[in-house]
Image (cartoon, grey):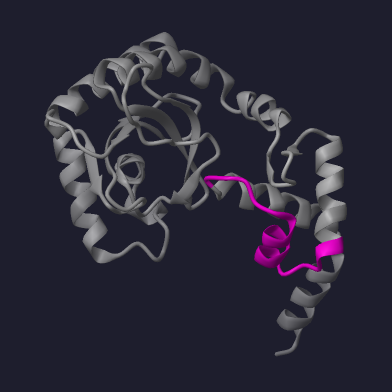
C-alpha cells in the first residue's frame, strides 16, 4: 500500500530543482507584461512578495540584458529586447498577420490584434492601433487574460473540443461559444476591460496554436456582424498566405 506514494516521492526527488532566481525574474517580466504602465521597484517587489533589495538585483540583471528599462523617474517597463524576442514567436504568422492588422485598424478606426492560446490564457502576439483615430483602446503585445473571458478567448475555444477547455470554464460559456461557432464570430462587452467591447474571429492555421484576430473599441456605428465580416476577410487572407 506504501509503494505508490514512495515511488511518487522518489520521482519528485529525481526531478531537477527549479531555479528560484530564474523563476522570480520571469515573474517580473510577466507582471510588467500584464501592466498597462510602468511600475516602481517597490510596486514590483510588493506584487511578488520580495524584499526590495532582491527585486532590485533581479531588475538590474534584466536591465543589463535590455529586457526591462527604467525612465528618468526610476519607473520600470519592459525593454526593447522583449519586442525582439516576441517577434520570434510564431514569426510567419505574425509576419503575414501584421499587414492585415494594419489594414483593419485603419479602415475601422479600432485597435486590431492577433491573439493565440497559451496554456489556459489568451495572449496578444501583435497589435496595431489606428493611424488617424481621435482615441483608441491600447492592446499591448504580451497582454494576457484567461481564455475563458473576452471575444478572442471565445473564438479560440470555438476551435477546441470542450474536453480541452480549462476545467473552471463556467456553464454559461459553453452556450456563448456555441453561439459564436454558429455565427462565425465572438463578441464581448466589459469582460476584460470595463466599457470596452471586442469582436473576434477564429484563425486556424496549420502548424500553429489556435488563434484569433480581433478588434477592441469603446463605441462605433458599425454592427458586430459588419466588423466580423471585415475580420473574416483578413483571416482568410492570412490562412491563404500560410497555405492553410
Q: Nearer the viewer, residue 126 or 105?
A: 105
Please say if 21 is above or below 9: above
Query: Is residue 37 found inside the magenta-colored segment of the image?
Result: yes
Q: Quadrant of residue 187?
A: top left
Looking at this rendering, what residue extends furthest in the top direction? 241
Count the numbered circles shown. Answer: 0
- Identify the residue at image location x=69%, y=64%: 48
- Identify the residue at image location x=67%, y=60%: 43
Query: Is residue 113 found inside the magenta-colored segment of the image?
Result: no
Q: Quadrant of residue 53?
A: bottom right
Please say if 136 is above or below 145: above
Locate residue 34 relative to residue 168 in the image: left or right. right
**Residue 148, image x and y in percent?**
36, 54
- Identify the residue at image location x=68%, y=32%: 82
Quadrant of the frame with the C terminus: top left
Q: Nearer the viewer, residue 222 or 154?
A: 222
Q: Nearer the viewer, residue 5 or 192?
A: 192
Magenta segment: 36-53
Amino acid at each position: 500500500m506504501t509503494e505508490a506514494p514512495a515511488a511518487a516521492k522518489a520521482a519528485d526527488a529525481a526531478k531537477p530543482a527549479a531555479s528560484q532566481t530564474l523563476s522570480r525574474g520571469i515573474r517580473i517580466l510577466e507582471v510588467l507584461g500584464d501592466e498597462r504602465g510602468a511600475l516602481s521597484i517597490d510596486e514590483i517587489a510588493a506584487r511578488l512578495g520580495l524584499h526590495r533589495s532582491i527585486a532590485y538585483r533581479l531588475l538590474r540583471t534584466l536591465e543589463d540584458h535590455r529586457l526591462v528599462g527604467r525612465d528618468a523617474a526610476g519607473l520600470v517597463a519592459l525593454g526593447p529586447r522583449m519586442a525582439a524576442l516576441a517577434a520570434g514567436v510564431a514569426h510567419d504568422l505574425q509576419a503575414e498577420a501584421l499587414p492585415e492588422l494594419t489594414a483593419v485598424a485603419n479602415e475601422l478606426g479600432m485597435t486590431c490584434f492577433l491573439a493565440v492560446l497559451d496554456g489556459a490564457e489568451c495572449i496578444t502576439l501583435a497589435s496595431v492601433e489606428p493611424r488617424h483615430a481621435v482615441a483608441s483602446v491600447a492592446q499591448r503585445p504580451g497582454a494576457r487574460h484567461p481564455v475563458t473571458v473576452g471575444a478572442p478567448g471565445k473564438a479560440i475555444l470555438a476551435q477546441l473540443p470542450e474536453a480541452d477547455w480549462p476545467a473552471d470554464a463556467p456553464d454559461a460559456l459553453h452556450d456563448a461559444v456555441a453561439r459564436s461557432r454558429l455565427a462565425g464570430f465572438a463578441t464581448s462587452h466589459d469582460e476584460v476591460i470595463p466599457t470596452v467591447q471586442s469582436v473576434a474571429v477564429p484563425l486556424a492555421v496549420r502548424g500553429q496554436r489556435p488563434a484569433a484576430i480581433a478588434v477592441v473599441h469603446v463605441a462605433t456605428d458599425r454592427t458586430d456582424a459588419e466588423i466580423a465580416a471585415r475580420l473574416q476577410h483578413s483571416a482568410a487572407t492570412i490562412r491563404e498566405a500560410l497555405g492553410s
